[in-house]
Every structure is written in C-alpha cells, then in structure tokens.
Image (cartoon, helix red, strand yellow):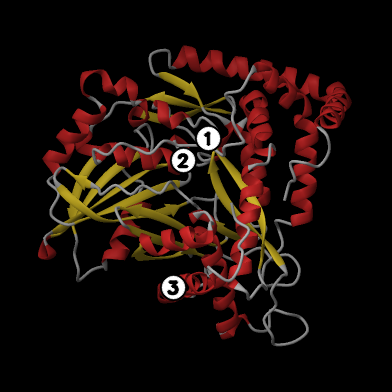
Amino acid sequence: MPNSNICPEIVQISLGILLWMLVSPVGLPVLGFLLVWKCASLLWVWLKYSDAFLQANNVMDSMMCLTEVGSMLSICLVGEGIIDLDKLRGHFHTTFLANGKDAEYPVFHQTFTRILGYSYKTRAPLDLTRHIREEDHAPTVETEKQACLRISRDHSKIRRNYPKWEIVLLHFRAEGRSSLIFKASHALGDGYCSRILIDKLTNNQPPIVKGPVTMKSSRSWWHMVKLLAKAPFLMVHTVVSSLTLDLTRHPFREGKQAAPTTTPSEVMHYAKESMDLARFKQISKSSGCKLSAIFMSVFLTTFRRWVAETPRFRGKSSTSDQVFLCEEAPLMFILPAPNHPADKGVFCNHALLCFIPVPLRENDKLKQLQTIHQRYQMEQGSPHGTASLLLKSVFGPLIPITLLDFGARMGSHEGFELAVNPFMMSHEKYEVVGVGVKELFVMQHSEFPIVPIGVGITPLTAGGQVTICLQGDDEIFQDSAEAELFLKNFVEEAHSLGEEVEKCAYNINLVCV
C-alpha cells in the first residue's frame, strides 16, 4: 500500500529526475520509434475513415477491446410495469439524438477499428430498431436470471461494424412488468459513464463524478511539472509496494494459484440481493466510516465465513485439513479519476485501479472496519494514482494494442481477485417512460483474455434500496445456488455489523474520519 509521505517532495523530485536520466538512453529511441509508428497509424485511419473517425482509444479503452466485443458491462433496470418499446425509442431519440444531441453523445454511434496495431473509435450508422428491441420471457424455458444473463452475453447485434451497445426490453407479461437491460462494450466507457447514461435515460440529474479530493488534476501547471518529474519515483515505489502486497498470492491456498483448466468467463456464477440502504447509512453515521469501506468490510467478513464453513475448502493447506487463510490479501476497487470526463459528456475509461491489503484473519468486525476504512482513505490520498494517470495520458497513446494483448494473455490466469466496485450512491428514484424502477443491478461478461478470476461485488442503488450484485468463479461457487447463499450470508453479516456498531458506538472510539 503506497504511502504518500515516504520522503520529502524535494527528494522524490530529485530521485524522479535521476530515474528519467537513467532510462532516457533506451527510452527516448523507443518512444521515438513508437511516435513514428503512431503517426503512421493516425495518418492511415484519417485517410481511410476521414468522415467517420472520432478519436483514438486511450490505453484503458484499448485494454477493454482486445477482442471484437471485449469486456461487456450490462445494467438491468427491473420495472414495476410494462415498458412500451415505441415510447422508449422515442424517449431515447429525444434525449440523446434529436436537435444535435447526437454530437453531444457520440458514444451511441461508436464502433472500433484497428490500424497498424492501434485502436480507434469510428462512427457507425445507428438504427434504433436494431439497437433497442424487445422479447417476451418464456418461463417454461428459462428463469428470469437465466434470461438476463443470456441477453447480457448475446453480442450478435453489436459485432462487426455496428455501434457497441444495445438495449433489450424483457417482458414478463403474466406479471405485468418489464426489465430494461442496457449493455455496452466496456471500451466505450467505465461503470461511472454507464451510471450517468442510466440517470439521463431515467430523467434524473446524474451525480457528479468526483475523484479523490487529494487527487486533483486541475491544479497549476507547476504542480503538474513537479508531478511529472517525480512520477518515475512514485511508480517504482508503487511497483515495490505491489510486489510486497503480492497481487498473485491466493487468499486460501499456500503459494500461487495454478492456472485454471477452463476459461473463467464460461464458469462465472452470478447472484443478487437487495437491502435497505438505510442500514448501511446508519452504520456509516454511527462509525464515521465511508459506505465503500463498509461494503468492503462486510464482503470480507462474508468471504472469510464462506471459506471457513464450506467443507471443500478444507485441505487447501499442505499441513492439515484445516482451511488456510493469508494474514492479509489484496482487495481491488475502482475510483473515478480526477475530473472524470463523463460529467462533460465524454465517455471513456478514466478510473484508477487500486489495491489495499485487507486483514483476512481479523475476527473483530469493528477493528476490521476501522482498518479497511483507514487504508481506503490512505489510498485515496496517495499521489500515486494521479502520477499513474499522468504517465498514461503522456505515454499511453503510444502503446500499441498488440503489446497490451500480449501482456493480458501472459497475466490472464495469475492471482485471485477479491474485488468491490463502489459506484456512486444515488438516492434518486428511477422511472423509464413513466414506469417506475424498483431495482437496479449490474452484470459483467468478459471474453478471453480479459477474464476475472475470483469473487467480487458491485452495490448499485435505486432510491432507498441497494442491490448487491455478486460474481464469482467456479472455485468459489459450484453453482448459482451457492452464490445466492453467499449473498444471504452477506445480508446476515451486514445486520450483525450494524448491531455491533450500534452497541459499541458510545463505548469505543473508531478512528475514522
């Protein structure tokens, strides 16, 4: 876990400049070659797609479209009534396309192309009859959950030269309601962008995407020069910290994880569970801890309980039939980068991938919450994220997608991921063309080589309700029933934490700001 106060700034700048000088004899010729390569690619794409060229993908966008579709992000809105297809198409056209708004939201016309190893967004014709469609649920053929997963994984309408998004209305005629499934390639934008689009589609004012308060990119040019100067030192320190954290270490196996025998994307199990958001807000109020840290702590407690209570996890240790758990394991989460462009209508992947060590053997839930909250706060206050973004924005455009593809394939089966995606918490009540929305949840599907390994949750709010969306591979869950049981345990642990916080609120001092 990087520490922002490792040494005085003047020392960081001096060491950063020294590192720049050391790598420049090799780095400058490489950068010069890549610059010429990128210019040739830009010239080609401009000549070939002169009327349709939109922009070059940043390095994070390119990571998400290594395959034709890449990683897909789907958000499902469960309606309280039947959503009319024609009304939805008309509402979509008015909100995002009519009166020149299509220029404000080019994301709905975007597809991808590769030229000389680099990825670009290009404009493709948009047909709402193709990209906004409907189907009726057949309860004798598949369950609601199976239908939602099938639709979210169906890429047939968005392959080849078509815009990489789709909206599907899934009607449950017998129950008199519909679900709206919005799915898009992750390369078009991150979860914060998708959340903003959903808010606009439901006529809500989207929440402002704020990065960590100490990671502001809108400072003076002098601050950015200093940050660029010390960036190599910060990056080296981050790498050393990551090695210390050991991101490839398995939380309940001794040693590193062996490569799986099946493609993880084919054996992921999903579940969801809705809870009253007031429960978490009360814990936050009583403890002084952020909601994100609370979700992380409850998730960790549930994971520890799951491993301890599930018989097949015994024998993972080489010494006995007892369950092996690391003292600490890395937990991954996403933070919106400073000045996220989604607020200005620009949709891309502009987020910070963060890791913190979390205690796996800590049975004191309050102490665990305090530890996670403090480390979460420290990561938010670290300058490493801003330095990383600065280097990505300066040098990232020169990295060809071929190298990204090679790196993803080399590291696609390493490690085990514990993850929490703390999206913005909006308290607005949603509706689509006059139909209320009672639940909001996310589903994510990735094609090789962008495949998740491990288990993670994504909490999404709709009004006063939060829906916890769970995704785990076949090492954690043998079937969907186990995933659903995991979330039931999550609900129990959330209530247990709330009771402990309320009981001890006046007797302990949680050092949480």
- Is any atom of residue 399 visible in this view? no
Identify the image quadrant of residue 24: top right
- Establish if 451 lies above or below 328: above
- Is any atom of residue 297 visible in this view? yes
Q: CA distance from mark 2 to mark 3?
A: 31 Å
Q: Residue at x 43, y 20 (%)?
A: 54
Q: Point out the tag, 1 or 2, that comes first from the N-terminus.
A: 2
Where is residue 336 drawn, in percent x and y? 52, 39
Q: CA distance from mark 1 to mark 2?
A: 7 Å
Crowdedness of circle 3 by 10 Å Cα count: few (<14), some, many (20+)? some
Callout 3: SS? helix
- Establish if 3 lies above or below 248: above
- Mark 2 = which residue? 190
Where is residue 481 drawn, in percent x and y? 40, 76
Where is residue 118 drawn, in percent x and y? 57, 27
Q: Point out the tag, 2 or 3, that comes first from the N-terminus.
A: 2
Crowdedness of circle 1 by 10 Å Cα count: few (<14), some, many (20+)? many
Q: In the drawing, what numbered circle is on residue 350?
A: 1
- Mark 3 = which residue? 495
Callout 1 touching callout 2 (CB < 8 Å): yes
Q: Is residue 512 left or right of residue 423?
A: right
Q: Point out the tag, 3 or 1, that comes first from the N-terminus.
A: 1
Q: Is residue 133 left or right of residue 328?
A: left
Q: In the drawing, what numbered circle is on residue 388?
A: none
Callout count: 3
Q: Residue at x 48, y 12 (%)?
A: 47
Where is residue 236 drawn, in percent x and y? 80, 39
> As shown in the figure, which amino acid type bears the numbered disc 1?
His
The residue mark sitting in front, 2 or 3, is 3
Callout 1: SS? loop
Q: Is residue 467 left or right of residue 405?
A: left
> As shown in the figure, which amino acid type bears the numbered disc 2?
Asp
